[in-house]
């Protein structure tokens, strides 16, 4: 069981990341805007997955499914990119 303090700190961190996302939207970063926004969203997804979904201490099937769900798009993008380069 995750402590109430940990849940509140995670919620506060998600709110701070939301504010950071909003602040970045008003700043022109050029091509780096996508990189910054994807980094922030990845951090939010990591927080939610590890704390709220309680994957931090889980080593069972749910952890395996989460890992595969992050790896599968990389495989798909890799094959798409390889197909694009071969044409």
Image (spheres, rainbow, N blue to C red):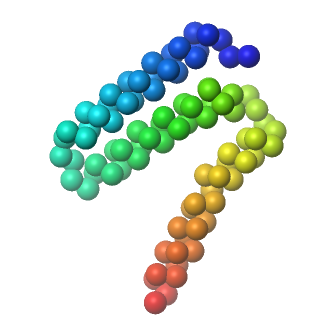
Going 55% across and 36% down the picture, which residue do you hit? 46
What residue is rendered at 57% in x and 74% in y? Answer: 79
Q: Is residue 60 above or below residue 80?
A: above
Q: Residue furthest bottom?
A: 87
**Residue 47 at what x, y percent from top left?**
54, 31
At horizontal 73% and vertical 28% (from top left) the residue drawn is 57
Quadrant of the image occupied by residue 20: top left
Question: From this viewpoint, is residue 56 visible?
Answer: no
Q: Is residue 36 above or below residue 22?
A: below
Left or right: residue 40 compared with residue 50: left
Could you tell whether 87 is left or right of 49 in the image?
A: left
Is residue 81 rendered to the left or right of residue 73? left
Where residue 82 appears, as percent x and y from the top left, is: 52, 78
Residue 9 location in percent, x, y? 51, 16
The answer to whether one can see residue 31 in this image is: yes
Residue 59 lies, in percent from the top left, at 78, 36
Q: In the rendered view, does 84 fall on the left or right side of 49?
A: left
Asked if residue 75 is positioned above or below residue 9 in the image, the reply reads: below
Q: Is residue 54 above or below residue 82?
A: above
Q: Residue at x 21, y 53 (%)?
A: 30
Q: Quadrant of the N terminus?
A: top right
Q: Quadrant of residue 48 in the image?
A: top right
């Amino acid at each position: 069981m995750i402590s109430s303090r940990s849940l509140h700190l995670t919620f506060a961190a998600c709110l701070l990341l939301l504010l950071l996302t909003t602040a970045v939207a008003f700043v022109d970063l050029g091509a780096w805007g996508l990189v910054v926004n994807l980094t922030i969203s990845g951090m939010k997804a990591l927080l939610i997955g590890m704390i709220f979904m309680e994957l931090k201490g889980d080593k069972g099937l749910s952890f395996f499914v989460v890992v595969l769900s992050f790896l599968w798009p990389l495989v798909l993008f890799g094959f798409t990119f390889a197909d694009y380069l071969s044409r």
